[in-house]
Image (cartoon, rainbow, N blue to C red):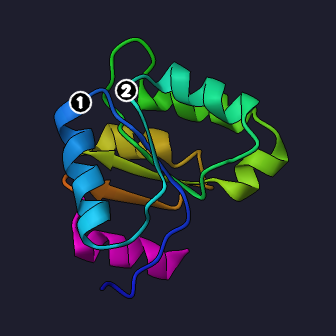
Amino acid sequence: MSTLELGSVMLVDDSRVDNFINCKILELNAVTSNVSVFDEAAKALDFLKSNLNLPDLIFLDIYMPSMTGFDFLEEFESLSLQIKEKCKVVLLSSGFDNLELQKLRKFNWISGIIVKPLTYESLEGIISIN
């Protein structure tokens, strides 16, 4: 049994394969049993706006069609203080270039950046920061 512990987690990624893998990693490491999965950023935002059971941690992919992770972050910034204080956001992507990292600097409340896939070590790092 893992000593890592997260509360509820939200995965926001358009890739069903990545969502499946990330859910399995969370499950196998006994990090959380409460995972909400969204394959569209807009649906995840709607959930956050209308739900009292907010996740403690959001793993957000940057590269998604329709609404990108950057678009999600812009919208998230306008949400209530209660939501922003409760939900920590960790970016999860296949890679970041310097221009993207520059764009992300304006969101000083981002709790971390992880290159896919999730691993026990990356989860350990996020938990130690938060």
Vertical comparison of 114 with 30: above or below: above
Q: Nearer the viewer, residue 43 or 80?
A: 43
Outermost residue toward the right in this view: 81
Helix, strand or loop at label 1? It is: loop
Check disc 2 and report the residue beneath it.
39
Helix, strand or loop at label 2? It is: loop
Taking the magenta stretch, the answer to whether it contains residue 92 is: no
Overall secondary structure of the magenta section: helix
Task: Give the quadrant of the N terminus.
Answer: bottom left
Check disc 1 and report the residue beneath it.
15
Q: Earlier in the sequence, mark 2 or mark 1?
A: 1
Specify few, some or many for label 2: CA neighbours under 10 Å numbering under 14, 14-19, or 20 or more.
Answer: some
* Res. 69 image quadrant: top left
The spot of residue 33 in percent (x, y) is 43, 61
Q: Amino acid at mark 2?
A: Asp
Report if the CB atoms under discs 2 and 1 are less than 8 Å apart: yes
Q: Residue at x 30, y 26 (%)?
A: 14
Q: Which residues are magenta?
A: 118-130
The spot of residue 121 in percent (x, y) is 25, 76
